[in-house]
């Protein structure tokens, strides 16, 4: 993303990688929201996203006018999607802010574009505002283990995105956001033993690595499902 004078946007320093990773992993388990210093970025609200809202999000559903949400294809009854307007804006985005922020969907609470620089995956040209913001983040890698952790996360993401044929059918998500979420969930599979600067499992076959990833998700290789 560029400014009008074509000067590069300034970097956005953020957390120590190990701290960010621990918070993100905890959020995956507990469902708590992400703490993202968005500043003046509104990319998530204005990038033509369909927002998944679960049946138990009653406070959110009560604040969305009828007709704006519709049943989510392929999900159990009660799961809905909130669409976007002709400009690609969420219909609850008003006055340059979320009009239901205190009761926003869990999908919005958990979204963190830092997952892209963390994993090395990108949205390409599909979501330019989000991609531009994601490109600016700079993790602090000075703490012990930071570089090893980000190396493992990126190795996980690379393997998942490039090796779908080694996984059960339907296990690997088709979009980079969900692939990044999965990589964070299973990155430990790619951590090298302490004192080893390489990537764990260098002697494993792709099939064995895929099996280890599936096991790290708590799935048997036979069930072929992913809830990442």
Image: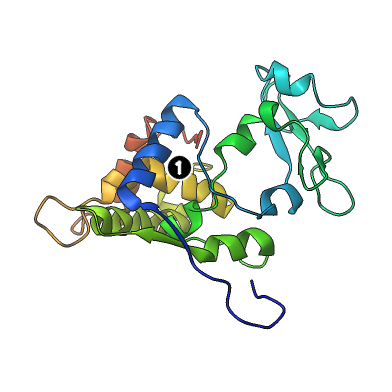
Res. 127 visible in picture: no
Question: What residue lies at 39% left-to-right and 38% top-to-bottom?
Answer: 23
Res. 200 visible in picture: yes
User: In terms of depth relative to the viewer, which is nearer, 183 or 28?
Assistant: 28
Question: What residue lies at 51% left-to-right and 38% top-to-bottom?
Answer: 34
Instruction: Pinpoint residue 7: horizontal percent, then vertical percent.
Output: 61, 81
Q: How many marks?
A: 1
Location of residue 83 by image quarter: top right
From this view, report whether residue 72 is shown above or below residue 149: above
Q: Which element type, helix, strand or loop, lies under badge 1?
A: loop
User: In terms of depth relative to the viewer, which is nearer, 61 or 141?
Assistant: 141
Instruction: Pinpoint residue 205: horizontal percent, then vertical percent.
Output: 26, 56
Residue reaching furthest left?
A: 195
From this view, report whether residue 103 is shown above or below residue 184: above
Question: What residue lies at 72% left-to-right and 47% top-to-bottom?
Answer: 45
Residue hosting label 1: 168
Left or right of residue 91, residue 160 in this image? left
User: In terms of depth relative to the viewer, which is nearer, 156 or 162?
Assistant: 156
Instruction: Pinpoint residue 65: horizontal percent, then vertical percent.
Output: 88, 26
């Amino acid at each position: 993303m560029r400014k009008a004078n074509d000067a590069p946007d300034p970097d956005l320093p953020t957390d120590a990688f190990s701290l960010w990773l621990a918070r993100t992993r905890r959020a995956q388990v507990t469902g708590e929201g992400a703490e993202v210093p968005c500043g003046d970025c509104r990319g998530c609200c204005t990038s033509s996203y369909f927002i998944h809202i679960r049946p138990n999000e009653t406070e959110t559903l009560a604040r969305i006018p009828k007709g704006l949400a519709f049943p989510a294809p392929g999900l159990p009854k009660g799961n809905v999607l909130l669409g976007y307007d002709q400009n690609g804006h969420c219909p609850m985005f008003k006055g340059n802010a979320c009009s239901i922020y205190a009761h926003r969907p869990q999908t919005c609470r958990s979204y963190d574009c830092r997952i892209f620089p963390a994993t090395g995956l990108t949205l390409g040209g599909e979501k330019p505002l989000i991609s531009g913001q994601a490109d600016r983040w700079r993790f602090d890698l000075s703490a012990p283990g930071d570089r090893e952790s980000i190396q493992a996360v990126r190795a996980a993401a690379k393997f998942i995105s490039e090796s779908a044929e080694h996984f059960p059918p339907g296990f690997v998500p088709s979009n980079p956001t969900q692939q990044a979420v999965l990589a964070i969930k299973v990155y430990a599979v790619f951590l090298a033993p302490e004192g080893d600067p390489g990537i764990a499992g260098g002697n494993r076959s792709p099939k064995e690595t895929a099996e280890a990833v599936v096991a790290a998700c708590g799935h048997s290789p036979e069930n072929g499902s992913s809830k990442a």
